[in-house]
Image (spheres, helix red, strand yellow):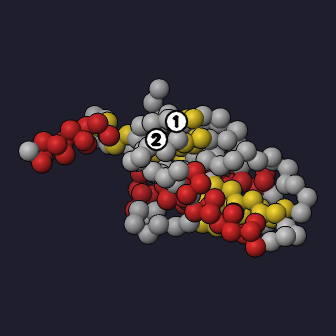
Amino acid sequence: ILLGIGEIIARTMFTFTAEGLTAIHLEIFEESDVYGWGHHPGSVDHHGYGNPTPEVRINSLGFRDDEISLEKPENTKRILVLGDSFTFGMGVAQEEIFTEVLESKLNEASEEVKYEVINMGSIGYTTDNQYLLLKEKGMQLDPDMVILAFFTGNDVTEFRRHEWVTDSNGVPEKIIDTKHYVDE
C-alpha cells in the first residue's frame, strides 16, 4: 500500500521522458542558445514546487527576484548570487530565499548604503551555466561582489551532461545540455 501511494505521489509530481529523466513542472523556463535554459522574463508559476506551494515570479531580467534596473542606483552596492536550486529557492516562498534574507539583514544594518542582493540561481545549473549567465547578463548589472553558492552534492557531477562550444582559448561560449531540455 505504501509503495502504491509513493508511486501515485511520484507520478503526480514528476514526468518521465523516454530517457527516464525527470522534468520539473514549472512554467518559467525557456531555452537559451548560450547556457542551455533560463527563466522566461516576467513569467509566473502558481503551481510551484513544494508544500505549501509557493508562487514563483521571474522578473523582467529573468531572475527569481524583485524588479531591478540594469543601471545601478546611486549609493547602492550590488551582490550577485549564482547557484542552483538552493539559490533559486526551490520549494520556498520568495521572502524565505536566503538572498532575500541577506538583503534584508544588510539593509537593516546600513543607513548609508542600500544593498541589492540579486538571485541569479536556476534549478539544475552547474558552474559552467553560472559562468555563462554571469558573462551574458550579470556583468551588465555592475556588481560590487559576486558569490557562487556551490553545492558539492551535484554541482561537479552534473558537468557530464554538458558539451561545450569553446573559443580559441578553450573557454566555454555555449553549453549544449545532452540530457535536459525545455519543452512547450
Location of mark 2 (residue): 48
Seen from the viewer's position, the closer of residues 139 and 45 is: 45
Residue 168: give x, y in percent of width and height.
66, 55
User: Residue type at mark 1?
Assistant: Asp
Give the structural element (helix, strand or loop) at label 1: strand
Disc 2 residue crowd, few under 14, some 14–19, many 20+, Cα 10 Å: many
Location of mark 1 (residue): 45
Seen from the viewer's position, the closer of residues 30 and 57 is: 57
Q: Where 64 falls versus 183 (above or below)?
A: below
> Does the rendering let one see residue 121?
no
Q: Where 176 falls versus 110 (above or below)?
A: above
Residue 140: give x, y in percent of width and height.
78, 51
Q: Where 1 falls versus 155 (above or below)?
A: above
Q: Residue at x 82, y 63 (%)?
A: 114
Extreme residue in the bottom direction? 109
Taking the image as shown, residue 9 lies to the left or right of residue 173, namely left
